Amino acid sequence: MTQRSAATWRGTVARSRALIVALAMTLAVVAGGTSAGAAQAAPPLVAKDFSKPAIVILGYGLKPDGTMRLILHTRVLAGMAVGHMFPQSPIIVTGGNPRNGNTEAGQMRKMLRLYGIPEERIIVEDRANSTEQNAAFSVPLAKKADTSGIILVTSSSHQDRADGNFADAGGNILATVSFPDNNPSINVAQFVRDVISPFITVS
């Protein structure tokens, strides 16, 4: 990594911390019990079970040499932030599309392990080649792990499509966490949806 790219990476992480922390705080409120103020802010309310959510991180295309692009790094960072709020939860990484012998899910697993996530918490789904397949293959894994539903982690411009695919696959979406990408207006709108997602039906 060059000095310039390293500086860009550190800057991206630093700027994103506030957003990740805000989403994590929202989920922390849910984990501890919904407050009356939050309940009144997002009618109609839906009762959700956050006792053991599966945290599903969606993949993104690798570079030709098989390494992760920045956008996939940020998704994993967001997923880890949520994972620390729910230490009892499995983390499902989903994505195939192999490049240079590596899959998206395999590279996400390596990053999670590098940051200290225990092997037994990570479930690797490395066959999916599309968002529809991410959903079709991950939803059964979440159910097999005896989870109470799914917290779906991806990027802002991808979240709406992902929500629909996972709902169509029979997934119980408890909440969404979207890392901001290239469109400010989408980022803001999706952030609002993420914040209220623990309290409403996501489809």
Image (cartoon, helix red, strand yellow):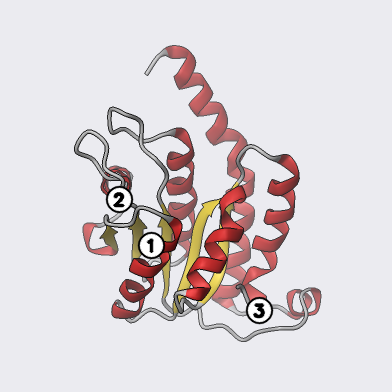
Q: CA distance from mark 2 to mark 3?
A: 37 Å
Mark 1 or mark 2: whose residue is earlier in sequence: 2
Q: Nearer the viewer, mark 2 or mark 3?
A: 2
Amino acid beneath label 3:
Thr
Residue 12's place in the image compared with 98, above or below, is above
Kindly report the distance in space between the C-alpha atoms of the residues bearing marks 1 and 2: 10 Å
- The quarter of the picture where the N terminus appears is top left
Residue 24 visible in image? no
Residue under label 2, please give it: 96
Query: In this view of the protein, which residue sits in the foreground, 9 or 60?
Result: 60
Of the pair 171 and 180, the residue shown nearer to us: 171
Q: Image quadrant of residue 87?
A: bottom left
- Helix, strand or loop under label 1: helix
Specify the amino acid type for callout 1.
Answer: Gln
Q: Residues within 10 Å of mark 1 (few under 14, many from 20)?
A: some
Q: Position of residue 86 (x, y in %)?
A: 44, 67
Q: What residue appears at the point 76 percent right and 45 percent down from the top-left corner?
A: 185
- Going by the picture, which residue comes out furthest to the left? 101
Per the image, the residue denoted by label 3 is: 34
Where 110 falls versus 193 (above or below)? Answer: above
The answer to whether marks 2 and 3 mark residues whose Cβ atoms lie closer than 8 Å is no
For residue 9, above or below residue 143:
above
Q: CA distance from mark 3 to mark 1?
A: 33 Å
User: Is the residue under label 2 in contact with that under label 1 (CB below 8 Å)?
Assistant: yes
Identify the mark nearer the N-term, 2 or 3.
Answer: 3
Mark 1 sits on what residue?
A: 133
